[in-house]
Amino acid sequence: MATEGIEAVFLETHNWGKSAKFFQSLGFELETSAGDGSGVFRNGEGAYLVLVEIPEDRAPGTQIALKVPDADDFHAGPAVEVVTPFEDTHYGTREMTVRDPDGRLWSLQAPAKS
């Protein structure tokens, strides 16, 4: 089974308010926020944008999550280096981390087991 495109983009920021306004100005709508400097945005049916505020002493990072419809049916091919196998997350998904040939880490995200 293959991935089905981009599920989400995770972005870290030093200023939640400014970043939220930036993405809203580009047409993203805030779907959920816990009021703790994090939230989930969406622009139409596109990928989720998860924005999280981090301390100033850390460099902001970006992570792209690819969609996997069923973690149990997914098998990484021989060219894929699995860093961590699928694990349950605290936010209701199952996530695997793989490394591409240039050393970048990618997240594969599947629905939680029912």
Image (spheres, helix red, strand yellow):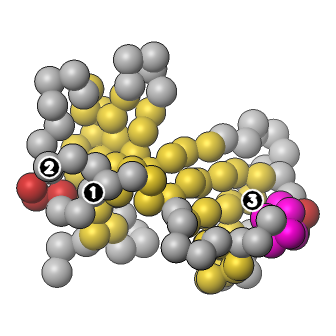
Question: Marks 1 and 2: in contact by CB < 8 Å?
Answer: yes
Q: Secondary structure at mark 1?
A: loop
Q: Relative to 88, is 77 above or below?
A: above
- Which numbered tag is attached to residue 1? 2
Q: Nearer the viewer, mark 2 or mark 3?
A: 2
SS label for mark 3: strand
Image coordinates of residue 11 in percent, x first then y, are: 66, 52
Left or right of 85? Residue 105 is right
Q: Hey, which quadrant is residue 102 in on the image?
A: top left
| Crowding near the residue tagged with mark 3, few <14, some 14–19, many ≥20 C-alpha atoms within 10 Å | some
Query: Disc 2 versus disc 1: distance between alpha carbons?
Result: 8 Å
Report if residue 53 lies within the magenta region.
no
Check disc 3 and report the residue beneath it: 53
Is residue 20 rendered magenta in the image? yes
Q: Which residue is mark 1?
A: 68
Residues in magenta? 19-25
First in sequence: mark 2 or mark 3? Answer: 2
Side of 35 relative to 43 (left or right): right
At which x and y percent is residue 14? 83, 52
Whether tag 1 and tag 3 are in contact, CB under 8 A, the answer is: no
Residue, x 54% and y 45% (percent of image)? 63
Residue 101 point in image, percent of width and height: 38, 17
Q: Does label 1 or label 3 sit earlier along the sequence?
A: 3
Towards the viewer: 31 or 54: 31
Q: Which of the pair 23/103 is nearer the observer?
A: 23
Outermost residue to the top: 102
| Residue at 74% over, 59% down | 53
Q: How many marks?
A: 3
Judged from the image, the secondary structure of the residue bearing numbered disc 2 is loop
Would residue 14 appear left or right of 8 to someone viewing this image?
Answer: right
Rendered-image quadrant of the C terminus: bottom left
